[in-house]
Image (cartoon, helix red, strand yellow):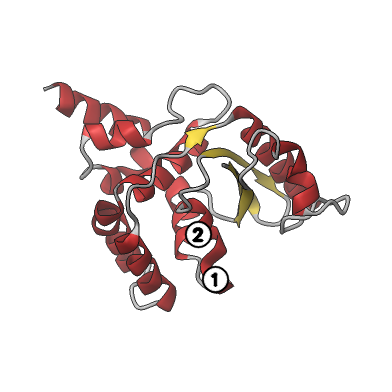
Amino acid sequence: MKIFSSILLFLHLFAIDYDYLEPWTAEQLQSANTAGSVDYMNNAEKTVVLYMNLARLYPDDFNNYVLEPYAATKRLLDLKATKSLQKDLASVKNIEALQPSEILSQFASAHATDMGKKGRMGHNGSGGATLKKRLSPLEMEFPKMVAENCDYGNHEPLDIVMNLLIDDGVKGYGHRNNILDRDLTHVGVSIKPHKNFEVNCVMDFGG
């Protein structure tokens, strides 16, 4: 009964993605919901973290419960990028969940706000600062590596994560690699309005 109640609670909190969350156990959802209790992300941003962690922690189930039905609905099953993602998920082993980071969320928020107000895309700030320069203050806390993903025009958390995981048209699947990189252990997520695309999402990672 406790497990069933927990599942219902998660499905209520993330009702927009009911069909894709319903198959998961309460334990799986709880282990992936690392950002659930933080006060510096909204529910949509927390759900982005949830989906990224489901892919990292349970790649086989993610393929069965999320990727295949999602790609079928969106008519993406035959894409080279989708097939590549399936292969990558099959090779994922023992990756820990991303932990939420307030400072990474602050940096993500600053860039998402900047890009949104100026109607820009990419990793360079509107003032010309490169990705390396923008994220360099994070290197002391995350000495191994820092990385960033940006998404434009997707309002729903699932669409944001799936767009970046499938990564169609992106050479080397860099966004996907960031999400599934075992050396990246922490994440901050920010979703902000965008002048040209209605909405944009920035994920900053550290390890």
Q: Which residue lies furthest to the right in this view?
A: 127
Q: Is 49 above or below relative to 71?
A: above
Q: Work out which residue is located at the far front of the displayed protein and give it.
A: 144
Q: Which one is earlier in the sequence, the residue at label 2 or at label 1?
A: 1
Q: Mark 1 points at which residue?
A: 172
Say few, some or many: other residues with alpha carbon within 10 Å of mark 2 (under 14 / 14 to 19 / 20 or more).
some
- Tag 2's secondary structure? helix
Asked if residue 151 can be seen in this view, the reply is yes
Circles 2 and 1: CB distance less than 8 Å? yes
Residue at the image point whose x is 52% and y is 37% from the top: 45
Disc 1 residue type? Gly
What's the distance in space between the residues labelled 2 and 1, CA to CA?
8 Å
Depth check: give the residue in front, 146 or 81.
146
Q: Position of residue 162 (x, y in %)?
A: 44, 57
Estimate the x, y position of residue 85 in percent, counting from the top left.
39, 66
Residue 166 appears in which quarter of the rendering?
A: bottom left
Q: Which residue is drawn at 68% across and 33% down?
A: 106
Residue 137 vs residue 17: left or right? right
Please give the name of the residue rendered at 23% of the width and 30% of the height, measured from the top-left corner.
8
Residue position marked by numbered label 2 in the rendering:
177
Q: In x, y percent, where is residue 154?
A: 54, 54
Give x and y (percent) for residue 187.
Answer: 55, 39
**Quadrant location, the C terminus:** top right
> For the view shown, which residue lies furthest in the left direction?
1
Under circle 1, the secondary element is: helix
Q: Which residue is drawn at 33% across and 66% down?
A: 86
